[in-house]
Image (spheres, helix red, strand yellow):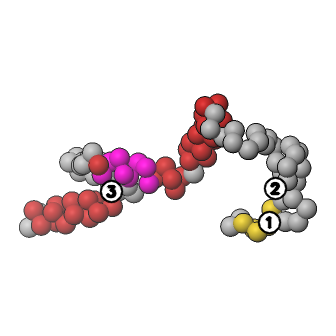
Amino acid sequence: MTKNGSYTTTPVKTSYGYVVIRMINNPGKGKFSSKAVQKTLTSQLYTSWESNTTVMNKVIAKVLKKANVTIKDSDLKDVLSTYLSSSSSSTSTTSTSSSN
């Protein structure tokens, strides 16, 4: 594939199954270092990350853990349990011990 608009003649196996790949834009050799191309690729990458819930959950979990977020309100203690699974289990153990 060397021209814009060309596509693979045989399907390519990917993690999603077999696909036919079409070239939308070939900027040419050595032209990926331009700021405009880098900005476009970065934008496409972030857009794909934003739509991927697994990536977003990992990012949120990392930020919350780095910030050492804890919830002390008993009504809200499980709100972030998806992201802070290790701290919510230790909180529940602590609250069980303190109720005795």
Q: Which residues are magenta?
A: 58-65
Residue sitting nearer the eye, 96 or 80: 80
Q: Which residue is mark 2?
A: 21
Whether residue 42 is in magenta: the answer is no
Q: Which residue is mark 1?
A: 12
Mark 2 secondary-structure assignment: loop
Residue 64 at x, y percent in the picture: 32, 48
Q: In the drawing, what numbered circle is on residue 84?
A: 3
Q: Judge whether 34 appears above or below 61 on screen.
A: above
Q: Which amino acid, mark 2? A: Ile
Residue 56 at x, y percent in the picture: 49, 49
Residue sitting nearer the eye, 56 or 1: 1
Q: Which amino acid, mark 3? A: Leu
Marks 3 and 2 sit apart, C-alpha to C-alpha, by 40 Å
Marks 3 and 1 sit apart, C-alpha to C-alpha, by 39 Å
Q: Do the residues under discs 3 and 2 have CB atoms within 8 angstroms?
A: no
Count residues near mark 3 (Cα–Cα under 10 Å), then give few for <14, some for 14-19, many for 20+: some
Residue sitting nearer the eye, 63 or 76: 63
Give the label, 3 or 1, closer to the camera: 1
